[in-house]
Amino acid sequence: MNTKLHAICDSQGRPLNLFVTAGQVSDYIGARALLSSLPDVDWLLGDRGYDADWFREAVVVP
């Protein structure tokens, strides 16, 4: 069995919040779990594993 570590980090790469899932679980599970703890920022950097319409709509402020 393996695991994935999903993280919210600051601009210096320091972790602010972490979430662990099983390795075979979709990245969307980690994204959904951490979504409410995203800080208010001007830009985000994420892996292609988090590329979903629902996620982009949730983080983009109109």
Image (cartoon, rainbow, N blue to C red):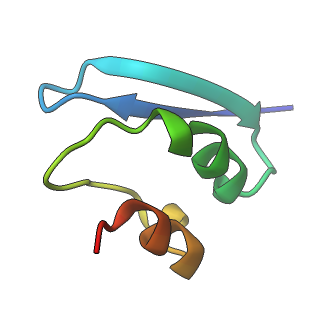
- Measuring 53% from the left and 39% from the top, which residue is drawn there? 36
Tell me the quarter of the picture where residue 22 sits.
top right
Tell me where residue 56 appears, x and y as whole percent.
43, 71
Of residue 22 and residue 53, the one placed in the foreground of this image is 53
Q: Is residue 50 above or below residue 62?
A: above
Q: Is residue 53 above or below residue 45?
A: below
- Measuring 73% from the left and 57% from the top, which residue is drawn there? 26
Left or right: where 27 falls relative to 9: right
Tell me where residue 54 appears, x and y as whole percent.
58, 74
- Measuring 64% from the left and 44% from the top, which residue is drawn there? 30
Q: Which residue lies furthest to the right in this view?
A: 1
Q: How many circles with numbers are drawn on the protein?
A: 0
- Measuring 53% from the left and 64% from the top, which residue is drawn there? 49
In the picture, the quarter occupied by the N terminus is: top right
In the picture, the quarter occupied by the C terminus is: bottom left
Q: In this view, does 51 lie above or below 14?
A: below
Of residue 62 and residue 36, the one placed in the foreground of this image is 62
Of residue 21 and residue 35, the one placed in the foreground of this image is 35
Tell me where residue 35 appears, x and y as whole percent.
53, 45
Q: Residue furthest front?
A: 62
